[in-house]
Image (cartoon, rainbow, N blue to C red):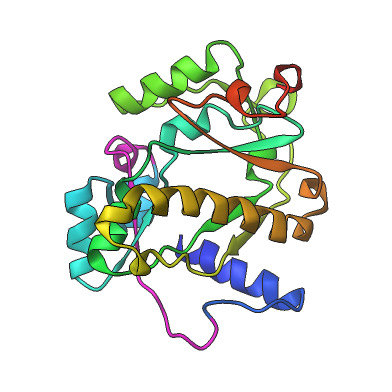
Amino acid sequence: MFNVIARAERNLQEKGCETIFGGRGTIKPVLCVAPAVQWFPFYGEVYGNSCTDGYSKTVRGILKKGLTPAVCPGGFSEACYNGASQDHEFAWLEGRAGFIKVAIEAGVDVIPLYTFGLDSMYETFDYGRHWRAIKAQKIGIPMVGWRGKYGSCVPFTEESISVAMEPFPTSKYSLDELSQACRDYAIYLEKGFEEYKHLLPSEKNKKLIVIGSGRSPEMVSGFSRSKL
């Protein structure tokens, strides 16, 4: 995550854009993921003590230490929709309020970090996509089948750019406003996607759709199942 953030800042500077990390010192991120991920090959060796589970208790403890938890709310569920459409990308945020709640409790803001081009690197199997996405989150194990070039693990493209957007002001909300904060964050992310997608030409015509366990792509107005 630290290299991704540094790369995002450099890419934006080269394109004449302002960056949110310039002149604000160095953050110390800790990758908070599904418990199984920290035991995947290479992850433990690469991240060491900077990779842990994403339970709310753990995230709160990281914040108390003055460190920055880096979370992926969509997790294994969102991964099931990787490469699912040529016209859309999907953010599995509906029903994921935990990271927003913790941020409100701690009085800190959330910095959306989005990698454009990542969705185009691999294609994932379409069969039972939404069912697998829900199941994967419940059992904590990825239920994704993927393929790259010629059916291999070589990605279709390596062209990508990571953007750290301006912080979303979760610190201005109270816990009584949690539901509103989640809705506002989803809208904020969609607007950020639209604002920065031009930085990668292959992404400029795509649209971000927020989905979740109770909100499949087919339930979104204007979305055509034939595009999957």
Does residue 98 show up magenta in the picture? no
Verify whether residue 35 appears in magenta: yes
Number of numbered callouts drawn: 0
Report if residue 121 is visible in the image. Answer: no
Q: What is the quadrant of residue 142 in the picture?
A: top left
Residue 54 location in percent, x, y? Answer: 28, 46
Residue at the far top in the pictured view: 127
Tell me: residue 24, above or below residue 56: below
Quick check: 201 above or below 143?
below
Q: Is residue 90 left or right of residue 88?
A: left
Q: Residue at x 34, y 53 (%)?
A: 100
Q: Position of residue 68 (x, y in %)?
A: 33, 66
Please determine whether, in this image, residue 195 is positioned above or below residue 22.
above
Q: Position of residue 195 (x, y in %)?
A: 71, 60
Main SS category, magenta section: loop
The answer to whether any part of residue 65 appears in the image is yes
Tell me the magenta residue range.
Answer: 22-41
> 202 or 227, which is in the foreground?
227
